[in-house]
Structure formats: structure tokens, C-alpha cells
Amino acid sequence: MKFIKENGPHIKSNDSTSKIMTRFLIALTPIICFAIFKNSVIVYSYASKGFIESLHPLFMIIVGALTSFISETLYYKIVLKNDLRTSLYESYRSFGIISGILLALVLPPNIPLWLVSFGSFTGSIIGKMLFGGFGQNIFNPALLGYLFISASYSNLMGSPFNAYELDTIGGATPLSNLMNFNYTGSFENIVSPFGDLFNLFVGNIPGAIGEVSKLLIIISFIYLVITKTIKWIIPTIYVTTVFILTFIISKYIDAGVWYSLFHILSGGLLFGAVFMATDPVTSPLTTIGQILHGLSLGILTVLLRFLTPYPEGVMTSILFMNMLVPLFDKIGIKARNNIRNIIIIVITFILIIIISILNITHKLDKNSSNVSELDSKVNILEVKEDGNKKIYEVTSKGWGLIKADVEVEDKNIKSIIIKDSKDETQWNEIEKNNYIYKVIQNQNNIDKLDAVSGSTYSSNALKNIVKKVKIEEAK
Amino acid sequence: MSGLKLDGKKEMSISSEIVDFSNPSRVYVPLMNGNTICACLTKAGKKVKKGSIIGKREDLDFPILSPVSGTVVDIKKCLYQNGEMVDTVVIANDMKETLVKKNIVSDITKYTKEEFVELLRKCAIKGMGGSDFPTFLKYKGEVEILIVNAVECEPYLTADLMLCKLKAETILDSITAIMKINNIKKCFIAYKENNTIVRDAFMEYIENYNDIVLEPVKNIYPAGWERFLVKKVLGIEYDRFPSEVKVVVNNVSTIYSIYKALKYQRGISKRIVTISGEGFSIPINILVKIGTNISTVIKEIGEYKGENLKFIAGGPMMGNAIGGDNLIVTSALGAVTIISDTEDEINECMGCGRCIKVCPAKICPAFIYKNVNNKEKLKELNPELCVECGLCSYVCPSKLGLRDAVKIAKKKVKE
């Protein structure tokens, strides 16, 4: 009788890397289904779109998954010089399709397919294979792909609406709407345009295809926690931190608890927390590390939402915090040796939280003074109503005084007709740049629009008109 | 403290009785104590009695005794439980069991502490839970609390369980004697809460003993680890040895051997060994002489089942698959497990952090694995704290040899 000679242990848990990844994919299926239901089925039924055209979101997911799989296979074949069989097997073993699917799910519904492919390719090759493949990457490949797309083709990124929503809702996503109100305002201004919080919870709002249904994300999260697939500490701490910080802010601006719930239920927070921040390869291994990671993600997301003109903040936070993972783990190991080693870190974090809140409240104060500044600069002389159309007659301070008529339909600015701009010295720059058209195009994200160089005063005067009218309309 | 619930599989080998195989024609006594090589104090052709000194661990002046009477035939290399070939004294058994000195003590509590320690050394009593650590060293200092370890947390193993079932009263007598001699105030018998056999066995007699308490511990592996037990039972931690906090932890089999030493002034000549696992037809507990070649016994009991078998000296978690079945029984060998090889799908470390979560010694196996060639970094990661319980390798979804890496790191740091 021959016996195998080997070091132990001789029994192993029956979980494996591929089982974990399979469970992760299972958790993603309801979200994929809802994405297709909302952006294909509904659109096909109500928005007079062609059948193939309606299936665009499905194609996005397929293209994302296929591109990452194929590009990894090619990398194994061409760069690492394996034969085709091994390359396919290696690519299967490194679970490339997951990052492709995740990428597609955080993109808006009407993005060109080649762009999905581009993001998926760069994510897999630059984000993963160049680092040495599965287990070696520092950044989440899906998010790196997302970064590449949004950095290099932001103008092609598309809007977060599907065709059905464009017809019916119009306007802004919950978060960009919030920003237009300078992060303060009543329930009616911030939540009501999208129905109520329940709508945000079930996903009946515009947004990236996979992010909107918080209900399904929570169900998937529970499944993933029960099956011990993900590091549950990170999303729990992350979302709790966002809740607590926005709760403090809501007390400051005299809003109710709905304000914090709104922050949690809007944008990609839950999706990012559950599916992106828990990516085992790019998150800390130690418990203390995971707690610090979740805490930092929460703080950074709130800071990005309140202090920068990018109201989303989740993807950027996760990508940035990927870089700090080794540091968090180092702290985690020290804490494991002796918990007293992290007293300084705890103090630092408390200070960071206090400074963050002070910063945000300061900004909010400044914003409200900006609003009164806006009042002093833009004057509404008269509002004429004509059916569902409204025409605002306004003046706005540039170099001199701009007079204009703003035509509004369904809370959207349709046109701005300039009646007087003779005091503006550089008005030709405005016209050369077709700036009025741009202002109307970007009415929901007006703070992101840059002024025309050489004609800043006139540009700002035009932007102020839009802001003022938008605020009036939302009242 | 961490740890994990494992499938115990103990019901496989629990039977009503222990089968006696304690009459081997030849015994092979390894000249080893743990992993320390001992000197040979006999030679071929010499007649020995049961209890004659045939070897010695020189640094501790700790003897190796002959388990049978007969003639030394040879000194040859045999397979030891760590998987290596070591020198063994081969003795042809004359089956007469002639003792060096026949002696029965009527009152086993009438020893002084010094006599007791000396007796443990002379009788070569050592840790029978697997450590092989000379027991007399544990009793050298002042002792306040004794913890009897009947936890037996490795899957498949039932040797200690069976001993408790059959010899509960003797064990309690032994404990009482040890307590009286060493002036110990309190004793805890720790057992796994689901091993009710242990509880039931002692329950009958325990009422008569005020200072002995039955202490259930959680059904997790490695609940039988010394540090874990002290922490769970007493809630205290120590730096290196339990003696720092005046605690002695003894395996229940060791306690039984101490009884033999106190009563008959004899060393360990027999022990119970579990033979279990899916790869063996009749899982069983057997009573064998120290030095028995276990393959001869196995052939008499049953046969191997299945392909790609592993013959493990010890339990599946901490034992070694030694690559052959000609294993020599020592006092530290509690079991032989025969199971088939697992088919592992090995992958890169994905960073799930399970090994870190589960590690009872609070180290970070994944980071040690990644930095195994970086000595400076290893020093920060404290691999020397590892108890080699193997849980890190057990839970790893990528099936990496984490314990092996930590073992290597341990050596590197000590250099």
C-alpha cells in the first residue's frame, strides 16, 4: 500500500475561490435583471423604442463581460506566451468577467458600447494584468475602467436617464438636484421630485443601470453575508459613517432624518459599498483595517459630495482608498499585536471627522450667502404663463446688465433670448463659443460648466440666470 | 479568541470497548523525546526488564524506559511520527512482563512535592496529548490550579474520550493525589461541551470531590490548546508558559499515567490509540504497547479503503501524513487517521482575510505567506507565536500552504 507524504492539515474547508466568485455572480443576478427590466422592458413598452435599441443595457453588460474576458485571455496568450487552452483557463480562473459586469452596472444606460468595451479593456489590462493578474492588483479593475472612461470621454458619458425617464421625469438625478439646491432645502425640493423615499429605495429613479434598486442590493448583501462571501464590516461601517455624518449635517440645516436616508439611498453608495469596496483583493484583510477602511470611505464620500462639484463621490472614494489599503493593514497588524498601538490613529480619525464637519458647515453657510448674492445679482421682472410654458423676464449683472427672456417648459429651460447685452465688452466670445446653448445644455449641472475665458463676468451672469430660474421653478 | 467549529467525526470510532493489542512480539522504542534526539544506553544482546533505562535525554536527565521485558535485538532506523527515520531500540518481547522492581504503594497521597517531581522524572512521564513534554518540569514551581485537558479537539480522535469513559474514578483519584501533594487549591476538568460522554463519565463520582469542577468549553478547534484553555477556563493570559501564572495543564492520559507512577512507580508502557478515518474499514480504539509497529496491528483489525490514501500520525489537523504505515507508537501518539487526499483547486491569495480572522494566536498568516522571504518584515509579523494548529490552511479558499509558510517563517526569525 502506498501512502501520500504531505504536510497537513489534511482536511480543508469546502469553500474555494471559484465558489466565492460564483456566489458573488449569483448576488449580482437580481441586480442585472432589474437593470434590464427598468432600462429595457419598461423602455420598450412605454417609450416607443425599437426592440434591439431597447436591449442596449443588456448588450452593455455582455460587452463588458466579454471584453474583460477576451482581453485577459489575449494578455495571457500574447504577453505571457501561454497556449490558447491555458490562456482561456487562466482567464477563467482569474474571474475577469466580474470586473466587466461591475463596470457595465455603474454606467448610465445610454453609453456607446465601444466605450463600455474601452473601459472594460483598460480596467482589465492596466488595472489588473499589468499588476500581475488576479490577487496582485492595487486598484479595483472595474473602477479603474470607469475612471478611464469618465476622464477621457466625459462628453460621451451620456446622461443617467433611460429613454422612458427622459420622456416622463426630465430634470436631474437626485444627487445633482440636491447640488442645485446647494445641499439644503426641504423634503419637497429634494425628495419629492422623485416621488418619495420609497421610490429611491426600490429604484424607480434615474441613475446608472445597476445602482438604483437599493432593495435588491440589500437583499444581495444579506445573501453575501450569510454565505460568508464578502467582508461585511466594510459596507456596514461605510454606510453607517455616511448616515451619521449626514445626520449631523441634517441637524445643522434643520432637516429631518429623511435627509440622511436620502444620502444613503441616492447615487451609487450602496452598490459601491457592497460590490466594489468589498473586493477582496483591493480591501484590507485585518478587522481593524476593514473598520478604518469603511470609516475613511464614509468620510471621503461625504466630503466629496459636499465640497466638490461632483455630487456622486462613491467611485472616487473607493478608488482613492484602494491606495491606502496597505496602510490600513499595517495599522491592523499593529492593533492585533497590541490594541493600544492604535490610540493615535483613533484620535486622528476623530479629528478628521470634526474638521470635515466644520468644513462642510462652513461651505453650507457660504452657499446660503451665495444664494442671497444671487438674489442681488439676478432680478426676475415678470413671469408670463402660457399653457405649460412659462417665460421669465430677467436681468442679470455681468459687466453691465444683461436683459433676457427665459422660456421654461416642464421645469426645463428651453431657450434663453438675450434682449440686451450692449454693456458686455467681450460678448463676441460668448457668441463664438455658443455659450448660451451650453448653458441650456448643462442646466442641471451648471456649476460644472466652465466660464468662457476672457469673458468670465458675462459667463457667470448667464449661469446665474439659469440658477435663479431653476431655483424659482423648483419652489 | 478565534477558532472554528470543525466536523468532529468522533462517533466513527466510539465503541463500547477498547481492543487489547498489547502483546507485540517486538517493540521498537524511538530514542526521541518530542523532536530531541536522545542517547542510547543499551546495546544489542542485552537483557532488559520492563522499566529498565534504555536511553536518556541528556539535557534534562530524562530517561527512556523499556515498555516490555526481553532482549535487545538491534538498534535500527524506523519511521517516527514526524515522518523521519530515527534510531529505535528493537526489543524482542519475552511476554513475561518482568519488572525492575515490584512495588505497590497503598496511599498514593503520601509523597512530598520533591519526591513527586523526582518520581515523574524517573518514571519518564511526558505529555501524552501530543507535546511529549516532560511532565516533571511543569510541577517544579509552585502550583495553584490544575487544568485537566480532556478536550481532544482534533476531529476523529476519541482516545482520551474512551479513557475518561472507562477510568473516570482512577483519574479522579490521581487528581486528588496530585492536588494534595502539590497543595493545589482547585482543579478543572475541561471537556468539549458536545462530548457528553466525558461529562457523564465523571458526573457519577464528581459530587464527592469538592475542589474538582467539570468545565465545558465551546465546540471549537483548537479549544484544547494550552493557552486557549487557560484563557477560557480562568480568564487569564500568560507570556510563554502557564507556570508563570501558577497553572499546570495536563492531558487526561498523562494524569492517568501519573496514577500508575504514584501507585506502582512505573513509567508509561501502554496507551490508547484511535485508528479512524474514511480510509479504514473498522475505526476503533486499541490498547497498544509503546513501541508497537502499528501496521502489524492494523493488518489484524481491518483493511484500507479507497485510493490516494494518507496515513496520518495524529489527527488530520496537526498530524503528518508520513508516507508509510510502518509507524512506531510513542506515548505522544494519540491516533492514526487514514483518509483520502483532498483535491485542492489552488489559486492566488485573493485577500479574503479568513486566515487572519480564524487564527487563535492572533497572527496574520496571509501576510507572512506574502513576505516569507523578507526577514525584516517577518519580525514585525511575529510568526513565532504560531501554534501550528493549521486552521489558516484549513479555511483558505485558495488552498494555500499557509501553515507551512508560517513554519518556515518561524525558523527564519529564530535564526
Image (cartoon, coloured by chain):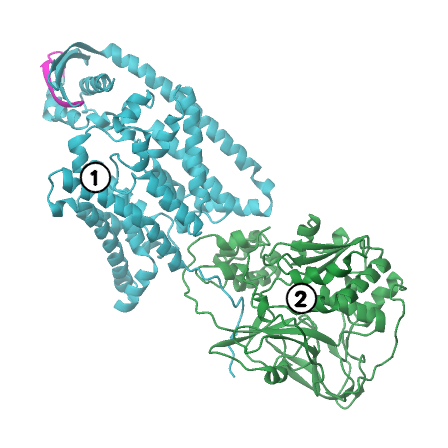
Chain colours: A cyan, B green
Q: Residues within 10 Å of mark 2 (few under 14, many from 20)?
A: many
Q: Residues within 10 Å of mark 1 (few under 14, many from 20)?
A: some
Position above or below: A201 against B311: above
Which element is circle 2 on?
A: helix
Identity of the amino acid at label 1? Met
**Disc 1 to disc 2, how far (Cα)?**
68 Å
Of tags 1 and 2, which is closer to the observer? 2
Please state the horizontal and vertical placement of residue A155, each as a whole percent of the image. 19, 37
Please state the horizontal and vertical placement of residue B386, each as a whole percent of the image. 60, 58
Which residue is at a point 21% across and 39% down the rendered structure image?
Answer: A157
Tell me, yes or no, if residue B250 can be seen here.
Answer: no
* Camera-side residue of A6 and B216: B216
* Camera-side residue of A336 and A26: A26
- The main secondary structure of the magenta stretch is strand
Please state the horizontal and vertical placement of residue A198, each as a whole percent of the image. 32, 32
Left or right: B196, with A307 as reference point: right
Quadrant assignment, res A67:
bottom left
Q: Chain of mark 2?
A: B
Image quarter where the C terminus of chain B lies is: bottom right
Identity of the amino acid at label 2? Leu
Labels in figure, total: 2
Please state the horizontal and vertical placement of residue A275, each as a whole percent of the image. 36, 46
Of the numbered discs in the image, which one, if any, rests on residue B5?
A: none
Region rendered in magenta: A411-425
Which residue is at a point 65% across and 74% down the rendered structure image?
Answer: B273
Which element is circle 1 on?
A: loop
Of the numbered discs in the image, which one, if any, rests on residue B161?
A: 2
Which residue is at a point 63% across and 61% down the rendered structure image?
Answer: B195
Left or right: A349, with B74 as reference point: left
Q: Which residue is mark 1?
A: A157
Left or right: A328, with B45 as reference point: left
